[in-house]
Image (cartoon, rainbow, N blue to C red):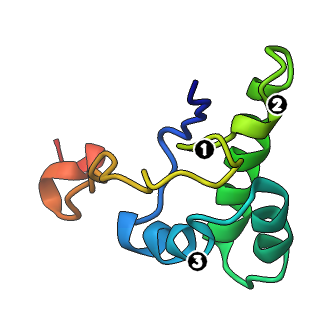
Amino acid sequence: MQVQAVTKNFRMSAQKMREVVRQVQGLPAEEALAVLQHVPRKSARVVAKTLRSAIANAQPEGLKSEVGSDSTGAVGSEGAGAGDRACRAENGRRSDPAML
């Protein structure tokens, strides 16, 4: 059985997240957490938090060894996907309420 955790609505590009996720793919969960502690990127903290959540999701079911996509406890191959696009306000006369 596969255990998963998903982080949604995090404002960072998928490319930046994938760089960190690819560093820990295939590693055992505890070793991946150790690696993520030494990566000096904001996305590494988010990936570590999501990995801790996946480990916690596995513990109540007695599946701690099955974190990730296979039964060896390895971090899964599914990484960061594309999130929502940022909506930027247009600066100019039409966005200024005093001009209306």
Element under label 1? loop
The residue under label 3 is 23
Q: Position of residue 90 (x, y in %)?
A: 20, 59
Amino acid found under the numbered disc labelled 2: Ala
**Residue found at x 28% / y 43%:** 97
Task: Report, in whole angstroms, how far the alpha carbon at label 3 lies from the one at label 2.
Answer: 22 Å
Taking depth in this image into account, of 1 and 44 the one nearest to the observer is 1
Point out the image quarter for the N terminus. top right
Residue closest to the far top: 61
Residue 10 x/y as whole percent: 52, 49
**Side of 89 where 50 appears, left or right:** right
Q: Residue at x 85, y 25 (%)?
A: 59
The residue nearer to you, when weighing 2 against 12, is 2
- The answer to whether 42 appears left or right of 83 in the picture is right
Query: Dot 3, how many residues are within 10 Å of its Cα: few (below 14), some (14-19), or many (20+)?
Result: some
User: If you read the primary sequence from the N terminus, does the residue marked by circle 3 or circle 1 appear first?
Assistant: 3
- N-terminal-most mark, 1 or 2: 2
Q: Which residue is mark 1?
A: 68
Instruction: For mark 2, give the secondary structure.
Output: helix
Q: Which residue is mark 2?
A: 56
Whole-number angstrom distance, CA of label 1 to CA of label 2: 12 Å
> Which residue shows up at 74% across the image and 82% down it?
39
